[in-house]
Image (cartoon, coloured by chain):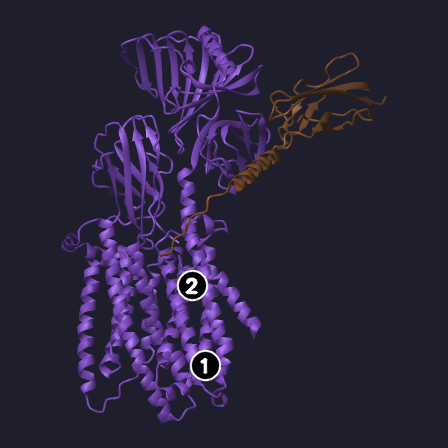
Chain colours: A purple, B brown
């Protein structure tokens, strides 16, 4: 017996997760959060992890004085991208505030981030992020949870506990006790149903107020409430809860029973039709909605008339329709599930969530009803307690088991790993909930194993009133703890699940570099692109866009440039369709070169080398030797007559432009880009064509300087010395430096013998460059095109 | 109201983290000064074979750079008896094998000269060995 209790307690300790999985979060933005821009953007683009409701999701951009500088945002057809048009922004610091209503689960999220224009400095790192849960909303949701739990508990209690435990008594006595208890439970039903209605209405109002930031009068006058109630998941969830609460409020008189049954079938029909049309959000604003409302209204009037007329017919035998009340209670819980994280995670998650709620209502709501039933005259209580308590005990244990099982599943669904318990607020709330469940189970266990046996002693016990009193006290404490748990549940449902917030916090930081070698194109996702363990994901396509063969191998070789660490080579595991991943590559902060190799049988490896700089800038001290080498290199490069150069620049989100240059010093350049532009500079004359189109000639105000990568060597700050590396014929020294404004960071391979720059990596906001310089002092001719 | 104060990691925690990171990095770099060592060869170094081989195959313990690693076979007079293209076998995805195709050769002693350049750090290792084709 005690082993079972222990198993129960352990299960519950593990359980207790609330439903939870989709929440709209900004996955990526352009400009990126906390970025420093040279030129003012024309718009802010927000990319969400799931589709958001166009009428209730918004974003504003404000200048340093707090004045709004953005126009009305537009949401794309798939609901995942929001474009916020901007005025002409002068240099300064700008703040983006966004709010989104998920069309998946109806949760609202908001956040803020900043960017700077023309200041050359980033906003502070800690600026921005997600807004915490809305406290007012949490309070309203808490009231709603308590009310729903009580209401469902009160509906199910007579059916599960009261009536079965009165069997075996004298029928007249049983009927008296049943009616007596039912009258007291009716009070619970009326109060909790009213509270469900009020809380649901208040939730809609609070949500609309928070989302629109309008005054109460504007909200009512602007029709926002109607849009929210009819057009969004939380709206429909609230409508379901209100409707079911209203049905449960109907009295048990024949007309009430009839109306309840009619109303329930009306509602089931309605939900069926709505689902047929693809859910509430899809139905909103369409002609079908009007049709549904019309059919519903006609049906409602007919059933109302029948409910009034039928009981008037003498000698008519109306069915009990006893199943209607539990069914309405079940639908009421569906109205909670519809508004939960679980709704966005598929049918199994939603069903689990519903079961979790049902079990909570049976246990917690049932406990409250048990206490209410025992508030009876002393002699009745002496009869009721020994019968109700054991029966309830069994029901509660079943509820506990269901909660434990469904809770474990939900926790597994929403919290990916143990660290997330401390790393995310969702995880922390869940931890608190687990801690609160312990005293709850302990109180239940005391009642079950210490007090119940004395109650069951019945007639032989000298004074049955005393254990009953103690039971009431402990039961009350249990109910109070349960109400506390529901506070945490309310906070949980207003917080993005750990899996979502972890995923997007890394996605926001993820870096996508791209490179090209021959016809092999490589995209490299680095997550989180911070010092510490990183995940590399490589996407490879060959000439015709096809992934490489099955037996091709992808290797990721990381070399630390600022110290003698590595290189380390990792074989990436194929994940299908040309994707390869390496997990947990631990990289300390500093300058790295990441080489991605595609290895196929019979041919040389395709190699792309990509720049990666982790952690804060400016860590390395200025080094006089390095400065000397850099200056010597600038002089050697200036003395070279010709060279070729290939620069690959990616934008950090997968875009790539490859430019092949031929330079003849001092003022001739021929360049071709992978975008199909060819340009020839001869002195101050520029010839440009796209593809094989005609050449366009233009005169510039002054001659071009055929410097190529040399330009980056000339203005260098914070020059530091890195490792020695072989580079072709000679040995090279890696030198690292920054542009004077600190925007761009460079790492250059400088030949120890020739002082020439052989390779160059650059990292700047939205610019990741890999440059290769070769064919120095060869016979390169750059002539004006025919 | 419930309020959770996130606990900042203590300095001890940071130290442990740093040590852990360092260990993980060093652990992932097998040998900073790795250079390729000969593991085995066909024909085996110093061996005498009865039939003249068509290829010489040398296996190393490290990934080699195909662009700079070479394998050459000469006879007693120092003349090349391979096709001049001896180097890393591109059919080996590990890139640890070097291969030289031989012209038809007769009996006598032959010298295999290898230059193995490690792929990751370009460290150059070289060596020679001999084999004999019995008359």
Q: Residue furthest right?
A: B135
Toward the viewer: A253 or B130?
A253
A596 or A741, which is in the foreground? A741
Q: Position of residue A285 (x, y in %)?
A: 21, 55
Decide if residue B5 is on the left or right side of residue A87.
Answer: right
| Vertical order, A147 against A382 (above or below) | above
Q: Secondary structure at mark 1?
A: helix
- Say what secondary structure mark 2 lies in: helix
Frontmost of labels 1 and 2 is 1
Q: Position of residue A319 (x, y in %)?
A: 29, 84
Badges 1 and 2: C-beta atoms under 8 Å apart?
no
| CA neighbours of label 1 inside 10 A, class few (<14), some (14 to 19), many (20+) | some
Q: Is residue A65 left or right of residue A450?
A: left
- Residue toward you, A6 or A606: A6
Q: Please tell me if label 1 and label 2 are on a single chain.
A: yes
Residue A585 visible:
yes
Categorize mark 2 by other alpha carbons within 10 Å: few (<14), some (14-19), many (20+).
many
Cα distance, mark 1 to mark 2? 37 Å
Q: Which residue is mark 1?
A: A467
Tell me the residue at 23%/59% (across/down): A229
Q: Quadrant of residue A550?
A: top right
In the rendered image, which quarter contains the N terminus of chain A? bottom right
Seen at 24% across and 34% down, the residue is A63
Q: How many marks?
A: 2
The residue tagged 2 is A352
Going by the image, does A378 lie left or right of A639?
A: left
B114 vs A783: above or below: below
Q: Disc 1 is attached to a residue of which chain? A: A
Q: Quadrant of the C terminus of chain A?
A: top left
Q: Position of residue A105 (x, y in %)?
A: 33, 55
């Amino acid at each position: 017996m005690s082993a079972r209790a222990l198993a129960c307690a352990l299960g519950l300790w593990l359980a207790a997760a609330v439903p939870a999985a989709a929440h709209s979060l900004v996955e990526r933005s352009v400009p990126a959060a906390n970025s420093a821009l040279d030129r003012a953007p024309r718009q802010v683009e927000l990319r969400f992890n799931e589709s958001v409701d166009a009428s209730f999701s918004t974003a504003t951009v404000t200048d340093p004085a707090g004045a709004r500088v953005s126009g009305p945002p537009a949401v794309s057809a798939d609901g995942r991208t929001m474009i916020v048009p901007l005025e002409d922004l002068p240099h300064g610091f700008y703040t983006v505030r966004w709010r989104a209503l998920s069309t998946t689960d109806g949760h609202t999220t908001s956040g803020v981030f900043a960017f700077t224009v023309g200041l050359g400095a980033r906003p502070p790192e800690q600026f921005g992020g997600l807004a915490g849960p809305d406290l007012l909303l949490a309070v309203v949701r808490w009231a709603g949870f308590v009310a729903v739990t009580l209401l469902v508990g009160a509906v199910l209690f007579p059916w599960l506990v009261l009536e079965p435990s009165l069997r075996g008594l004298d029928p007249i006595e049983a009927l008296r006790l049943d009616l007596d208890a039912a009258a007291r439970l009716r009070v619970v039903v009326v109060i909790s149903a009213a509270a469900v209605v009020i809380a649901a209405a208040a939730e809609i109002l609070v949500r609309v107020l928070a989302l629109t930031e309008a005054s109460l009068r504007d909200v009512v006058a602007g029709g926002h409430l109607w849009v929210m109630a009819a057009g969004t998941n939380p709206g429909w969830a609230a409508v379901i809860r209100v409707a079911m609460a209203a049905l449960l409020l109907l009295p048990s008189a024949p007309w009430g029973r009839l109306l309840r049954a009619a109303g329930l079938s009306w509602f089931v029909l309605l939900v069926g039709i709505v689902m047929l049309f693809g859910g509430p959000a899809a139905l909103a604003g369409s002609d079908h909605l009007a049709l549904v409302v019309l059919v519903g209204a006609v049906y409602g009037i007919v059933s109302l008339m029948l409910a009034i007329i039928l009981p008037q017919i003498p000698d008519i035998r109306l069915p009990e329709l006893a199943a209607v009340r539990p069914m309405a209670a079940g639908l009421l819980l569906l109205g909670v599930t519809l508004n939960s994280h679980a709704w966005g995670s598929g049918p199994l998650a939603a069903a689990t969530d519903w079961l979790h709620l049902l079990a909570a209502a049976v246990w917690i709501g049932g406990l409250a009803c048990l206490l209410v039933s025992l508030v009876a005259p002393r002699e009745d209580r002496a009869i009721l307690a020994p019968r109700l308590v054991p029966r309830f005990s069994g029901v509660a244990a079943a509820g506990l088991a269901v909660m434990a099982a469904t809770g474990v599943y939900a926790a597994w669904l929403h919290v990916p790993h143990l660290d997330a318990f401390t790393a995310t607020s969702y995880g922390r709330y869940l931890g608190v909930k687990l801690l609160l469940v312990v005293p709850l189970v302990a109180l239940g266990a005391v009642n079950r194993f210490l007090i119940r046996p004395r109650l069951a002693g019945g007639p032989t016990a000298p004074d049955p009133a005393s254990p009953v009193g103690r039971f009431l006290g402990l039961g009350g404490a249990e109910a109070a703890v349960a109400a506390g748990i529901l506070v945490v549940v309310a906070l949980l449902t207003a917080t993005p699940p750990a899996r979502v917030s972890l995923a997007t916090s890394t996605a926001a930081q993820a870096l996508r570099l791209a490179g090209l070698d021959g016809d092999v194109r490589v995209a490299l996702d680095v997550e989180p692109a911070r010092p510490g363990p990183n995940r590399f994901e490589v996407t490879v396509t060959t000439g015709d866009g096809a992934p490489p063969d099955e037996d091709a191998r992808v290797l990721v070789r990381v070399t630390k440039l600022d110290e003698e660490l590595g290189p380390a080579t990792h074989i990436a595991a194929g994940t299908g369709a040309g994707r390869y991943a390496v997990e947990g590559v631990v990289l300390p902060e500093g300058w790295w070169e990441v080489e991605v190799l595609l290895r196929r049988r019979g041919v040389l490896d395709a190699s792309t080398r990509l720049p990666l700089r982790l952690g804060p800038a400016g860590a390395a001290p200025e080094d006089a030797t390095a400065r000397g080498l850099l200056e010597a290199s600038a002089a050697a490069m200036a003395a070279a007559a010709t060279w070729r150069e290939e620069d690959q620049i990616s934008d950090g989100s997968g875009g790539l432009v490859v430019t092949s240059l031929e330079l003849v010093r001092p003022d001739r350049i021929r360049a071709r880009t992978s975008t199909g532009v060819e340009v020839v500079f001869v002195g101050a004359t520029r010839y440009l064509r796209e593809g094989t189109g005609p050449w366009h000639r233009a005169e510039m105000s002054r001659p071009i300087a055929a410097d190529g990568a040399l330009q980056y060597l000339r203005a260098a700050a914070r020059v530091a010395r890195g490792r020695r590396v072989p580079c072709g014929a000679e040995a090279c020294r890696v030198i690292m430096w920054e542009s004077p404004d600190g925007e761009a960071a460079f790492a250059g391979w400088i030949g120890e013998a020739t002082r020439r720059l052989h390779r160059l990596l650059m990292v700047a906001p939205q610019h990741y460059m890999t440059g290769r310089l070769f064919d120095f002092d060869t016979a390169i001719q750059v002539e004006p095109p025919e | 109201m419930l309020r959770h104060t996130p606990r900042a990691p203590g300095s001890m925690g940071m130290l442990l983290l740093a040590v852990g990171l360092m260990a993980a990095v060093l652990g992932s770099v097998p040998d900073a000064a790795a250079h390729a060592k000969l593991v085995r060869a066909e024909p085996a170094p110093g061996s005498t074979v009865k039939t003249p081989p068509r290829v010489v195959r040398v296996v190393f313990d490290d990934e080699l750079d195909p662009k700079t690693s070479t394998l050459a076979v000469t006879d007693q007079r120092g003349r090349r008896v391979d096709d001049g293209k001896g180097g890393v076998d591109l059919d080996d995805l590990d890139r640890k094998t070097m291969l030289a195709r031989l012209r038809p050769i007769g009996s006598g002693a032959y010298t295999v000269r290898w230059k193995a350049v490690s792929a990751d750090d370009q460290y150059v290792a070289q060596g020679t060995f001999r084999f004999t084709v019995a008359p």
